[in-house]
Amino acid sequence: MHISPDEIIFWQHGFLKLNSTIVMTWALMLVLTVGAKIITYKISNDIKRSGWQNLLEILITGIEKQIRDVGVSEPKKYIGFLGTLFVFVGAASICTVIPGFDPPTASLSTTAALALSVFVAVPFFGVQEQGIGSYLKSYTKPTFIMLPFNIISELSRTLALAIRLFGNMMSGAMIVAILLTITPFIFPIFMTLLGLLTGMVQAYIFSILATVYIAAATRVKKKKTLTKQEKKHG
Amino acid sequence: MDSATTIAVASIVIAGITTGFGTMGPALAEGRAVATALTSLAQQPDASSTITRTLFVGLAMIESTAIYCFVISMILIFANPFWKHVIEQTAGK
């Protein structure tokens, strides 16, 4: 039994390996980008529009609304990054219904790469929004003693992001594989259904956590206006 | 018992204990979180979207501790470094 799709190797030449994770990631990237290109090739502005365009619009407006709800005032700025995370992880978990497809997110390499991109993106957006001095100062809040703990939390949440997604996706595949040996016929189907549900929830959680981190890094400057808003809502 | 058997027995038993005890805390915590969220949903149905989102994020945070335990027990069973070491030693002989 394979604990990760890294161990399924399609092609090998010396140091270079083409394992299942890379191939499936490329296939997903191809399907997503080419699909989006084809759908937006004949984009229409009036009421007559294709179902696929409707699907994309629902997806984009939904993601935009979620990002705005978390507290980011300009979701358009971050939707490229956060939307890509959601669509990739979500598509990877939905495509598990296709026989022979291993979700690339069931490999620790993929999830670590996604978590690292969040780890880099959060300070990047933070510095872009409030300048390097102000951003670095936010590490020493509320007092200077908290500096090492803030840095540790930055590292540990990246680790948690990677391990959470990996554990959930890997456990889905693993549980189905174990059940196939015990109760082969009907029960694994229900577990596959449950795996689809948890896959979507994990995609949602991954992107919403990234949004929360970005919101926390970019919002410090506008704290006063926000508390006023919160008072109004509360 | 020789060392190979000891390692095998220890890995399997500890893998079971890890998942068993490791899911206990998160299960209690998730139950409490969902119960509280349901109470506040019943009191304030208007704030349902905010409550649900916060609940999901919180559940993910809680659940990740159980997932860590699961990953560790999977490593102990399927990718055990100590077991690999023993196998390599016996194959080398």
Image (cartoon, coloured by chain):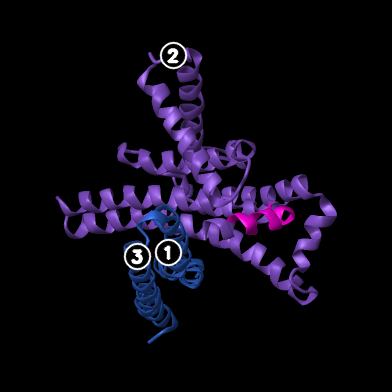
Image side of residue A132 versus residue B83, left or right:
right
> Is A41 in front, or is A10?
A41
Give, as a three-letter code, the residue at label 2. Asp
Q: Main secondary structure of the magenta part?
A: helix
Mark 1 lies on residue: B59
Mark 3 lies on residue: B43
Q: Which residues are magenta?
A: A219-229
Residue at position x 74%, y 71% from top? A142
Give the alpha-carbon distance from disc 3 to disc 2, as whole Å. 42 Å
Q: Position of residue B70 (x, y in %)?
A: 41, 67
Q: Secondary structure at mark 3?
A: helix
Q: Residues within 10 Å of mark 3 (few under 14, many from 20)?
A: few
Q: Is residue A220 magenta?
A: yes
> Is B59 in front, or is A30?
B59
Mark 2 lies on residue: A46
> Is B41 in front, or is A72?
B41
Question: Is the N terminus of chain B in the top left, top right, bottom left or bottom right quadrant?
Answer: bottom left
Q: Position of residue B37 (x, y in %)?
A: 37, 66
Q: Secondary structure at mark 2?
A: loop
Residue at position x 61%, y 47% from top? A72
Q: Is the residue B1 above or below the residue A99 in the image?
A: below
Q: Looking at the image, which residue sits at the far bottom?
A: B1
Q: Colour of chain A?
A: purple
Residue at position x 75%, y 68% from top? A141
Q: Colour of chain B?
A: blue
- In the rendered image, is residue A75 in sight? yes
Q: Is the residue A53 above or below the residue A20 in the image?
A: above
